[in-house]
Image (spheres, rainbow, N blue to C red):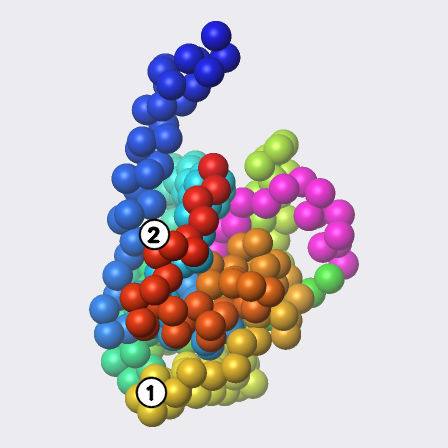
Amino acid sequence: MESSLYQTGVRVMVDKYLEEKSKEVRDYGEYWSASSAGYCMRKNIFDRLKVTPTNSDARKTRVFEVGHIFHGWIQDITKSAGVSVSQEGELQDEVLMIRGHYDDIIKTDNGLILYDYKAAHSRSFTYKKGKEMSYYHKMQLGTYMYMLREIEEYKDLAEGRICSISKDDLRMDETQLLWNQGLEETVAGYWTTLNEYWNAKKIPACTCHEHEGGFMAKDKYNPYYFQGESCSLTWYKLWKEGKHQEYIKKEG
């Protein structure tokens, strides 16, 4: 009886929907994705080369979809309240070769604030309490701020915030990032270095475990984890030689 339930009903429709949606990957072509700011440069290069992942993780697709649902929910609220200036705007930098979409720009009495929304488990609010914004969030938010400030309308944008929303009870928390010269240099330096590796056709070292707070620091979320190695060079060589298919794992 139980097995037949897994083959029919709404669950099947949802699984098919998510399977199709997972194929709709935003392809920025010759550009880097702004949302990958700060992540391991080897991983970003593998992504751009379209290296086949070592596993197909259906759970990860569901997690990302939950994030999209929460994004839409809070964006509807800020829009209805009349404080949202712009949502899901596309940004592009021709020098650093970055493209991306920001979540929300909110108008306040003290100026504009860029918001990036993150869905999170309620337990994360406990262990993140009192801690400053993670390196990855700083880099991602800083990259969006960098590109927005190139636009005349947003040249004075000086504040960004990560708004975390609990998937369990809708608890919310905000962390602030202020624009400064140091942030500008860090953001520009990261993308400049990544472009140098790409243009030289070099594969950099894996740095997935270098910074705390990123999902890539956990091997189970690393799309190129293979035989004990994050962003595996062994996997990359197998992929280049077309010998990788027999090793691919599928996880539900």
Identify the residue at image location x=57%, y=54%. Answer: 220
The amino acid pointed to by label 1 is Lys
Q: Quadrant of residue 34?
A: bottom left
In the rendered view, tell whether residue 1 sits above or below residue 215.
above
Q: Which labelled disc corresponds to residue 46?
A: none
Q: Residues within 10 Å of mark 1 (few under 14, many from 20)?
A: few
Q: Which labelled disc corresponds to residue 201?
A: 1
Residue 21: image x %, image y %? Answer: 30, 42
Q: Magenta stretch?
A: 116-130
**Mark sitting earlier along the chain (1/2):** 2
The amino acid pointed to by label 2 is Gln
Identify the residue at image location x=31%, y=31%. Answer: 16
Q: Secondary structure at mark 1?
A: loop
Q: Is 230 one of the magenta-colored residues?
A: no
Q: Nearer the viewer, residue 222 or 139?
A: 222
Q: Which residue is mark 2?
A: 87
Q: Secondary structure at mark 2?
A: strand
